[in-house]
Image (cartoon, rainbow, N blue to C red):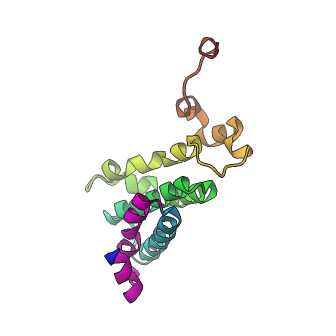
Amino acid sequence: MYMYAVYVKHKLTASIYRHMPSHLDILVGDYRRAIDANAAACLADEKYVAEHGARSFYSFYMMHNYHSLIYAAMFAGQFRVALETVNRMEASLPVSLLSIESPPMADWLENFASVRVHVLVSNTPGRTRCETSTDFVHQFLGPLWPMGRPHRTRNAIR
């Protein structure tokens, strides 16, 4: 709560001051406030990257903020917000960034490339029938589709 008060008082623009209160918001179930905090953090990150680039460890903090926004949105039942944020996160995670060997960026960042699958197969409320259909999920998962759902055989259904 103290950091949130500092942010409000000084209107700090650094993403960490906008993001950190969301850890408490998630713990107390105030998902809307967590969405607002992380959305502001992501915008601050995007502004920073536009000015300074993102070929450093800062990329990890940026992905963490996107990730936090996605999960806050999923907890709040805002599937569209989660999916739109996945799009922004993936756009900020180019293969060229993952191919940097020193420091080993893929070691820190490649796990964020799997978040779309989790959003699509989750039971997040707020999705329409179209969004939960096999065709919709298959469109994004392609050949990974069999791994993105529980394995069921004809005999297992009986």
The residue lying at 60 percent from left, 16 percent from top is 153
- Whether 20 is among the magenta residues is yes
Quadrant showing the C terminus: top right
Closer to the camera, 43 or 38? Answer: 38
Number of on-image labels = 0
The foreground one among 79 and 83 is 79
Q: Position of residue 3 (x, y in %)?
A: 33, 76
* Residue 71 shows up from this direction: yes
> Which residue is at a point 47% across and 69% down the rendered structure image?
42
Quarter the N terminus occupies? bottom left
Query: Residue at the spot x=56%, y=57% of the render?
Result: 76
| Left or right of 143 in this view: 9 | left
Is 108 included in the stretch rendered in magenta? no
Q: Answer above or below: position of 122 versus 1.
A: above
Residue 141 percent location from the top left of the image: 59, 39
**Residue drawn 60% across the image and 57% down it:** 78
Q: Predominant secondary structure in magenta? A: helix
In the rendered view, tell whether residue 155 sits above or below residue 62. Answer: above
Nearer to the camera, 153 or 56: 153
4 with respect to 126 (left or right): left
Horizontal side, residue 93 vs residue 137: left or right: left
The region drawn magenta spans 3-29
User: x, y (%) of residue 108?
Assistant: 32, 52
Whether residue 63 appears in this view of the structure is: no
- Name the spot of residue 74 as percent of width and height, x first: 54, 53
User: Which residue occupies the extreme front position in the image?
Assistant: 28
Q: Residue furthest bottom?
A: 10
In the foreground, 39 or 78: 78
